[in-house]
Amino acid sequence: MYSTKPGYIIGFHGCDEEIRNQIVLGHKGFNASMNDYDWLGNGMYFWEYNYDRAFEFALERQKNPKPSLAKIKNAAVLGAVIELKNCLDLLESRYLELVKFSYSNYSDSYKMIGENLPKNTNVSGSTDRLLRRLDCAVIENLHTLNPEEPFDSVRGVFIEGAPLYEGAGFNEKNHIQICIRNPNCIKAFFIPRTKVKWPKK
């Protein structure tokens, strides 16, 4: 009854400038990410209202390219107007219970075949478990358990990075991430504006 998220949000995606321009002009589509380590499962990823974090991500990819990921020559940010619709919102208790149930179901299936579950793991130089193979598999399993009312999007909060200060409960890279499974949730792409001031008379 209350699963549909009303209204629109703004999402930001860090990418190469040329790719962003082609998407905004309609010359190129926005492809879903299908990696087995994606934090919220398969879909199109955005930072919710977080332009700076998206740009930081693109800059990091530009400075430290990885063979398995698209190369970024000039870091840029793609903006999107998004309707979440039927959202698997991991900030809400009932959806967290669904994910817990999905884990139990997924774990039991692995026990039956005698194999080990995938794991969330760190990458070199980080303690944030950036490779979320277990989480991705559990969320994808939940989607298979819910075929009659498919989720259009997934929303999650992530505590990431070093503490802001000694003893802090806030971290440098905390963010809310959006994964769009239904491409029709994206109503428009745009090039984000920089802040402007009216000229003085």
Image (cartoon, rainbow, N blue to C red):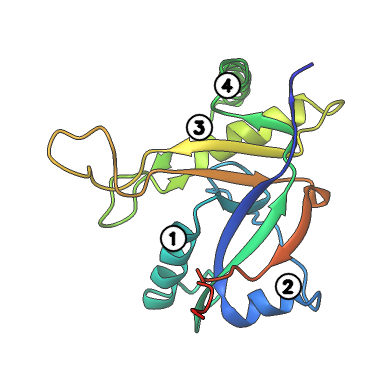
Q: Earlier in the sequence, mark 1 or mark 3?
A: 1
Residue of label 4 = 92
Task: Answer whether labels 1 and 4 touch (C-beta < 8 Å).
Answer: no
Q: Residue at x 34, y 44 (%)?
A: 128
Tell me which amino acid carries mark 1: Asp
The dot on residue 150 is none
> Of circles 1 and 4, which is in front?
1
Q: Residue at x 54, y 36 (%)?
A: 156
Disc 4 + disc 3, Cβ < 8 Å? no
The mark nearer the N terminus, 3 or 2, is 2
Q: Give the label, 2 or 1, closer to the camera.
A: 1
Type of amino acid under label 2: Ile
Q: Position of residue 188 (x, y in %)?
A: 77, 60
The x, y position of residue 68, in whole percent, is 52, 69
Disc 3 is placed on an element classified as loop
Q: Is residue 167 left or right of residue 199?
A: left
The residue under label 3 is 117
Q: CA distance from mark 1 to mark 3?
A: 35 Å
Q: Vertical placement of 141 versus 14: above or below?
A: above
Q: At which x and y percent is residue 127?
A: 28, 45
> Which residue is under mark 2?
23
Q: Secondary structure at mark 1?
A: helix
The answer to whether the residue labelled 3 contacts the one labelled 2, judged by CB atoms less than 8 Å apart, is no
Residue at coordinates 72% horizontally, 79% vertically from top-left?
Answer: 22
Distance of label 2 from label 1 (alpha carbons): 20 Å
Q: Residue 200, percent across and down?
A: 49, 79
**Where 17 sits versus 100, above or below?**
below
Observer-side mark, 1 or 3, equals: 1
**Quarter-of-image position of residue 153:** top right
Report the Cα–Cα distance between label 4 and label 3.
Answer: 26 Å
Q: Nearer the viewer, mark 4 or mark 3?
A: 4
